[in-house]
Amino acid sequence: MIDLKNIEMIYDDNGTKINALKVKDLKVEDGEKVAFIGSSGCGKTTLFNLISGMITPTKGNVIVEDIDITTLKENERDLFRANHIGYIFQDFNLFPDFTVLQNVVLPMSFSKRYEKGEMEKEAIAMIKRVGLEKKLDQKVKTLSGGEKQRVAIARSIVNKPNIILADEPTGNLDYKNGAKIMELILQIAKEEKATLLVITHNNSQLDMFDRSINIEELNEAIK
């Protein structure tokens, strides 16, 4: 379960306090597939960064997998994220001069899930799963946008996370490729029995999820 309680995220902009996010209570059950919507700047990415432990809130508690990650040190949050959370970014966040295989193997070194000798074998299996087995040794910078996102998906699930966060994973793709990528993410989450949280601006995708949450309405509920 993901459980956020009395969250406030406040930034200091040259002495001006900016409230980036306020969430009184948010729960996502294990295995749920939830879409997050809302206008740009309402705090969607901030929310995902809090859940992943990339940042910590100014106030409140973020409980993931029964662990209050706000109490962990930075290196402990990094290890927790490597073992429990897969993050898919809109801009892919890959190493362009690395091959497909190198990009997928990289996060495995931060997790304690695999022995060194197992990493390449597992990475190849994941790459095959997203349909890029013929491009293992191709540099990422030579791939299409849809192919890059498939690499990003393989990298995010190679450590078999319990939770997958996808921040506008189809935002840089055309409609046809975007639909294919979203279907692939949902299919993998279902097969892995993973909890899936997706930020999207595409309302036509909302019926694919168990429910949708408008971040602006969460903020308004506690004003």
Image (cartoon, grey):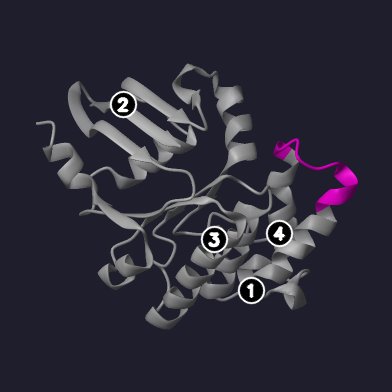
Residue 49, placed above or below residue 98: above
Residue shown at 85% from the left, 41% from the top: 115
For the residues labelled 2 and 3, say whether their Cβ atoms are less than 8 Å apart.
no
The question of residue 112 being in magenta is answered with: yes
Splitting the image into 4 quarters, where does residue 207 fall?
bottom left
Mark 4 lies on residue: 98
Amino acid at pointer 3: Lys
Mark 3 lies on residue: 190
Among numbered discs 2 and 3, the one appearing first in the sequence: 2
Mark 2 lies on residue: 5
Q: Specify the segment rendered in magenta.
A: 110-119
Residue 19 appears at what percent x and percent y?
Answer: 20, 30
Mark 1 lies on residue: 142
* Direction left: furthest residue: 223
Amino acid at pointer 1: Thr
* SS assignment at label 1: helix
Q: Nearer the viewer, mark 3 or mark 1?
A: 3
Among numbered discs 2 and 1, the one appearing first in the sequence: 2
Residue shown at 40% from the left, 28% from the top: 62
Residue 65 appears at what percent x and percent y?
Answer: 52, 32
Crowdedness near tag 1: few (<14), some (14–19) or many (≥20) residues, C-alpha within 10 Å: few
